[in-house]
Amino acid sequence: MDRRKPKIDAEAGLASPLGAVISYNDQATLGMVRDAIDTRRLRLAFQPVVLACDPSKVAFYEGLIRVLDPTGRIIPAKDFVAAIDQNELGREIDCASLEMGLSTLARHPDLRISINMSARSIGYERWLRLLKKGLAAGPTIGERLILEITESSAMLVPEVVISFMETMQDKGVAFALDHFGSGSTAIRYFKDFLFDILKIDGQFIRNINTDPDNAAIAAALLSIGKHFGMLTVAEMVETVEEAELLRTLGVDCLQGFLFGAPTVKPDFLAPADRKRA
């Protein structure tokens, strides 16, 4: 009897049990997202980004896409983004996020919002049309819009991202480098990017008050942001102790459950609008 363990071959796809499970799960996820897009079961959940010096003041809100299943249960983006980012569903989700974000900015002239996007969407015609139309809807919308691009996404096509940033400069649009420290930004590109905001990945913020390694890494990342004149944001701040140390290190803004979880019913909505959300 051959007692050798079966080999798990990533290239075998459906030939391996693991490949079959992954394929099935991905297809189920794609189907769920496709159905949610077609039936408009999409929402933006808003999370406040507060000033480190005065957490009672919100610098801006991050708009995070949420997909609803047929029962109305909210499914966070982390549960489906990886499965859709490389195909057209990812572009459609980016379109939906941008459209809802721009609409919110048009309805709330005192609000500033960041919206997540993939670098792949820069060449997607519908996304570009929505951006152009949204920016034309009001004279201050551009300067109140922040586009967030993850470090790994920006490095897919750095020259394209840099060119896009340059074209958006006269519109007043700001750019945030999301999850900084988790990817592989090449320094030779970093100085050419036009990021206005640097968001330090939450893995370096967790337990920063008791983890000297995280404290050292966060301090180094902050120094890069300050050198390039960027507003710095610490992600995933969950305790008072973490917030206090981050203030000591000189971070500009804080984001995390300590200051508010993402919600589809943010305080800036009127009571009637919150009921409908």
Image (cartoon, rainbow, N blue to C red):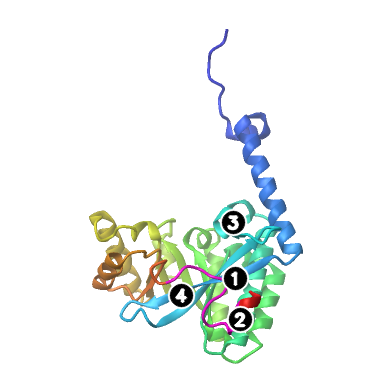
Cβ atoms at labels 1 and 2 below 8 Å apart? yes
Measuring 57% from the left and 59% from the top, which residue is drawn there?
A: 77
Q: Position of residue 96 (x, y in %)?
A: 67, 69
For label 1, the SS is strand
Sequence-wise, the earlier of marks 3 and 4 is 4
Question: For residue 13, which quarter of the picture?
Answer: top right
In this view, the residue in front, 55 or 149, is 55
Q: Position of residue 121 (x, y in %)?
A: 63, 66
Q: Residue at x 66, y 88 (%)?
A: 137
Q: Nearer the viewer, mark 2 or mark 3?
A: 2
Give the residue type that dot 3 points to.
Val
Taking the magenta stretch, the answer to whether it contains residue 261 is: yes
Residue marked by disc 2: 104
**Where, quadrant-wise, is the N terminus in this rendering?**
top right
> Could you give the CA–CA distance between mark 2 and mark 3, rounded to whole angstroms?
23 Å
Q: Which mark is residue 48?
A: 4
Crowding near pointer 4: few (<14 within 10 Å), some, many (20+)?
Answer: many
SS assignment at label 2: helix
| The C terminus, quarter of image | bottom right
Circles 1 and 4: CB distance less than 8 Å?
A: no
Q: At 53% across and 16% down in the image, what residue appears?
A: 4
Q: Residue furthest top?
A: 1
Q: Earlier in the sequence, mark 4 or mark 2?
A: 4
The span picked out in magenta is 260-274
The answer to whether 111 is drawn above or below residue 125 in the figure is below
Identify the residue position indicated by label 3 in the image.
81
Residue at x 72% of width, y 71% of height: 126
Q: CA distance from mark 1 to mark 4?
A: 13 Å
For the question of whether residue 172 can be seen, the reply is no
